[in-house]
Image (cartoon, helix red, strand yellow):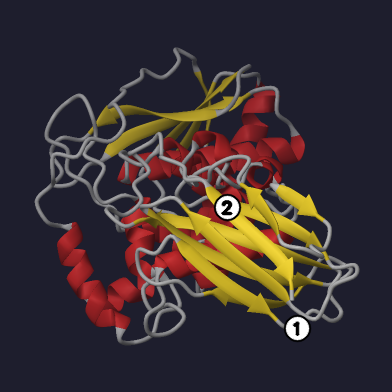
């Protein structure tokens, strides 16, 4: 069983992880806890006439004129075929409703006879979209409805982020806008305003053996069982699955927290510029910088240091508030802004300070101090625990 599960997940994990997967799957299937996730909302689809159905797939379009209905149906058929390749757990049937409003997906009904949570979902597609935008929104909402069917307890930010990342793979003309993701890197990845699609796309590209599989696996491996009628029991969640699946993914001891630290550096070259909390000249004398904004769990903060007039060594001393797990990395950039070297500041478990001395300063256009809040010491990050407590920091830099 673990072999077939491992093959489906499609994550680049060493063979020893197969033993883990067998154990973790049993844990995921354990009796549910009383943890509550998002509210259970059942929504009736719009009362629109059926205007077209596919001869090839169980897809129907409601509303719109003949031309828009036909174009939407063709876009959904293309998205469906791409979803098969990407490993998306597509629904048995799918209904899309054309309306002049932003596209979204919702749950129409729960299946209470199954052992794990399952729902019937539908999508409203923006009738004003055309061309590439129509294709992209059709794919995104089809995949969002697929996720709501098999993992109805999924948090809203992960739902939008993962379905957007998958749609960008399915639609060649589409791309992910990383502007909002990069402009407020201090926010938690599960913050709805964080637009975490670039994060999920990065995870899929960095750890998936085939496009889309690492994302789709987070839905397949997050079966939940809800007892009541008010809130979904949202355990395990998408982040639980990633936390388990990324164990040892880059070798013994590698963890989800290591992946977050790796992402924090990768964001320096992720298509849109990050916002620097500080952008300062080379420190000819010691200088202390406080965090303008505290950084939430899974968030990142950046301090840029101009490399002009750099001395032979750079000293970095960081302190931060208790309970946060902070990972500090100093990155060396060339004139094009590309990473050419990096060093991680080592800290003891549960420490609130870290220190680093960079001795290789030649050829640097700039240095960036990257501070990743990878969680806390008391409990793992949970997307349903928001608002997440951010933590401040103090950075002292100087030349030696």
C-alpha separation, residue under disc 2 versus residue under disc 1: 24 Å
Q: Residue at x 49, y 38 (%)?
A: 191
Position of 94 with respect to 62 (left or right) is left
Q: Can you tell which quarter of the image residue 316 is in? A: bottom right
**Residue situated in front as seen by the camera: 328 or 237:** 328
Comes first in the chain, label 2 or label 1: 1
Eye-nearest disc, 2 or 1: 2
10 Å crowding of disc 2: few (<14), some (14-19), many (20+): some
Which residue is identified by label 2? 394
Outermost residue toward the left in this view = 31
Q: Compared with residue 22, is residue 167 higher up or lower down, i.e. above or below?
A: above
Residue 244 coordinates in the image, percent (x, y): 32, 66
**From the image, which quarter does the C terminus lie in?**
bottom right
Residue 186 coordinates in the image, percent (x, y): 57, 45
Q: Compared with residue 384, is residue 245 higher up or lower down, i.e. above or below?
A: below
**Residue situated in front as seen by the camera: 142 or 152:** 152
Q: Compared with residue 315, is residue 155 higher up or lower down, i.e. above or below?
A: above
Which residue is identified by label 1? 360
Q: Secondary structure at mark 1?
A: loop
Position of 136 with respect to 155 (left or right) is right
Q: Pointers 2 and 1 in contact (CB under 8 A)?
A: no
10 Å crowding of disc 1: few (<14), some (14-19), many (20+): some
Position of 69 with respect to 213 (left or right) is right
Outermost residue toward the top in this view = 47
Residue 336 coordinates in the image, percent (x, y): 87, 67
Residue 17, numbered label: none
Q: Residue at x 49, y 14 (%)?
A: 48
**Residue situated in front as seen by the camera: 23 or 269:** 269
């Amino acid at each position: 069983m673990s072999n077939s599960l491992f093959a489906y997940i499609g994550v680049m994990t060493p063979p020893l992880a197969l033993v883990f997967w067998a154990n973790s799957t049993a844990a995921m299937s354990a009796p549910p806890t009383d943890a509550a996730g998002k509210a259970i909302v059942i929504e009736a689809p719009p009362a629109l006439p059926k205007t077209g159905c596919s001869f090839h797939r169980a897809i129907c379009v409601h509303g719109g004129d003949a031309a828009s209905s036909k174009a939407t149906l063709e876009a959904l058929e293309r998205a469906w075929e791409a979803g098969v390749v990407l490993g998306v757990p597509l629904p048995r049937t799918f209904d899309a409703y054309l309306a002049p409003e932003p596209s979204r997906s919702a749950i129409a009904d729960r299946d209470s006879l199954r052992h794990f949570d399952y729902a019937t979902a539908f999508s409203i597609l923006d009738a004003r979209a055309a061309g590439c935008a129509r294709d992209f929104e059709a794919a995104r909402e089809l995949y969002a409805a697929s996720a709501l069917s098999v993992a109805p307890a999924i948090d809203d930010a992960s739902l939008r982020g993962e379905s957007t990342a998958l749609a960008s793979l399915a639609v060649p003309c589409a791309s992910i806008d990383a502007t909002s993701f990069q402009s407020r890197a201090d926010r938690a990845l599960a913050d709805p305003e964080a637009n975490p699609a670039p994060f999920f796309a990065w995870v899929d590209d960095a750890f998936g053996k085939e496009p889309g599989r690492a994302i789709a696996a987070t839905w397949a491996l997050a079966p939940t069982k809800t007892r009541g009628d008010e809130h979904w029991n949202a355990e395990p969640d998408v982040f639980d699955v990633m936390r388990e699946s990324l164990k040892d993914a880059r070798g013994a001891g590698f963890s989800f927290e290591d992946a977050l630290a790796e992402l924090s550096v990768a964001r320096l070259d992720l298509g849109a510029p990050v916002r620097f909390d500080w952008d300062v000249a080379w420190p000819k004398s010691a200088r202390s910088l406080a965090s303008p904004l505290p950084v939430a769990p899974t968030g990142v903060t950046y301090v840029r240091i101009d490399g002009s007039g750099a001395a032979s060594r750079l000293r970095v001393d960081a302190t931060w508030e208790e309970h946060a797990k902070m990972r500090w990395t100093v990155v060396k950039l060339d004139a094009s802004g590309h990473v050419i070297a990096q060093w991680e500041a080592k800290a003891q478990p549960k420490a609130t300070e870290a220190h680093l001395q960079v001795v290789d300063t030649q050829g640097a256009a700039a240095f960036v101090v990257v501070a990743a809040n990878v969680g806390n010491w008391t409990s793992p990050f949970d997307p349903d625990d928001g608002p997440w407590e951010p933590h401040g920091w103090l950075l002292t830099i100087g030349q030696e």
